[in-house]
Image: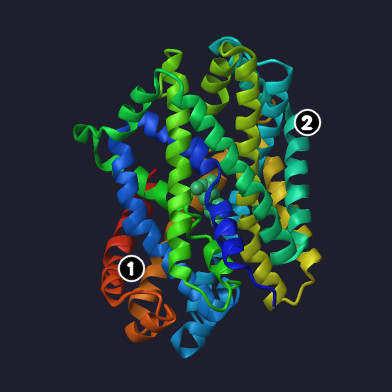
Amino acid sequence: MSRFSRIGFILAAAGSAIGLGNVWKFPYMTGQNGGGAFVAIFLLSVVFIGLTVFLAEMILGRTSEKNPVSTYESLAPHGGRYWKYAGFMILSGVLILSFYSVVVGWLIHYIFVSLSGLPSSVSEAQGVFGELVSESIFTQVFFHFLVIGYCGYILTQGVKQGIEKINMILMPLLFLIFIALLFYALSMDSFGKSLAFMFTPHWEKINANVVLMSVGQAFFTLSLGVGTIMTYSASLPKKGNFVSSALYVAFLDTLLAVVAGLVIFTFLFEFGSDPSGGPGLVFISLPVIFAQMGLVGQLISLLFFIALLFAGITSAISLAEPLLGYLIERRSWKRSKAVWAVMGVSYALGVLAILGGSKAYGESLKWGGKSIFDWLDFGSSALLMPLAGVALCIFVGFVLDKNRVYGMFGGYMPPFFFKIWLFCVRFVAPVAIFIILIQGLRG
Ligand code: PFF
Ligand code: NA
């Protein structure tokens, strides 16, 4: 069995964690929810809920060295007759992958837009984006195909030669690009304003909804509830402080979200734009600003979308791996067969999502008032992922023996922190995630 190196694991898990969630979702959520208040609650959620569940997934994967279904089955009392079903959270990875990779495909389109000429007004930018998602079915299907095909190719190479290698290349490049962007933003007058926007908590802006959104975001951004972290942890090096690896991953993931936010808001403020643009922030507001920055702006735009593409690819890959592990280990499928079957399903679902977003077929592909895109997102982020999170916390917090769980940390968890962590696994995290689940179901 091939294992990650220590740095390989950190970069692969960070590669999974750092994605569209950091550079797209986090900034627009921060913008919509008034800045500092959202950021403060988000940071707390990362530490007390995100990191808690992250470590829970890690110890299970590391102990069993198997796919999530077999992990639950082998660790549960009574042969895991029922608990193995908790392992089927791996299916949400495929659901997410199918629309996540469509959005990654849009990034390729925006790389071309950066090269060929950026939209110079908001209405023009809305036109570019609107045309892509509602008219250009072929363009989307094609770029989606490239993304799925490339990720599939990487995955056929296995953990070491595929996943570890691509992350060892793309993640340092991603960091370099963001360091460059940060320095550029630092040279602008509005950097201070951006900093104040993100770090001055306006407590009066906090309400139940802000709390729910930040907990959900902490969960999504750390790639939890899909079995990804569990699956990557099955290939952890035999020795080494994996608890500190988890801290590095959570730190890098948070850092990248914060830096992305700082950079984006600096640009927005510098050109008198509004931070509360919602999902269109990256695809509509930003390109207009890049256009106003002339040639430098074009270069920045190019780098920005390339970085986002790298972030997206390394996350997309990680979404498929848990199910691959299951098919290879439990169904004895050859790796390449498993890869192309999973990628094929994601591709087909993605094409449906594209059709559902188009003007031509959109209306006829709606069901219960939701588009296919919305259904895939709802089924995974609102339903399966939180469900998997609650199940995981109950399993680790109550089903498994406390001393055994302590042992799973292999001496890398100081007893004092173990107590705090156990309290979070038993009460803080499951209750918070359960509330998200209920809230999500109510719409
Ligand atoms: N963490 C990724 C992001 O922030 O974009 C998304 C993600 C990847 C979620 C892998 C879940 C997962 F298993
Ligand atoms: Na993330």
| Residue 228 tag number | none
Position of residue 55 in the picture relative to residue 170 (left or right): left
Residue type highlighted by circle 2? Phe
Reading the image, the residue beneath label 1 is: 425
Percent position of residue 274, x then y: 41, 18
Q: In this view, does 25 lie above or below 154?
A: above
- Residue at image position (67%, 36%) is 354
Residue shown at 62% from the left, 37% from the top: 307
In the picture, residue 7 is in which quadrant?
bottom right
Q: Decide if residue 277 is in sight here.
A: no
Measure the alpha-carbon separation of dots 1 and 2. 46 Å
Q: Residue at x 26, y 32 (%)?
A: 200
Question: Which of 132/294 is in front?
Answer: 294
Q: Does the residue labelled 2 lie within 8 Å of ligand 1?
A: no
User: Residue 227's image quarter?
Assistant: bottom right
Q: Mark 1 is on which residue type?
A: Val
What colour scheme does the image use? rainbow
Q: Residue furthest bottom?
A: 78
Q: Quick check: can you spot residue 151? A: yes
In percent of the image, x 34 and y 23: which residue is there?
193
**Mark sitting earlier along the chain (1/2):** 2
Q: In the rendered image, which residue does mark 2 sit on?
A: 138
Under circle 2, the secondary element is helix
Seen in the picture, residue 29 relative to 416 is either above or below; the reply is above
Placement of the N terminus among the 4 image quadrants: bottom right
Q: Where is residue 303 in the image (x, y as percent from the top left)?
A: 64, 31
Q: Where is residue 54 in the image (x, y as percent from the top left)?
A: 44, 63
Residue 108, quarter of picture: top right
Above-or-below relation of 34 to 372 = above
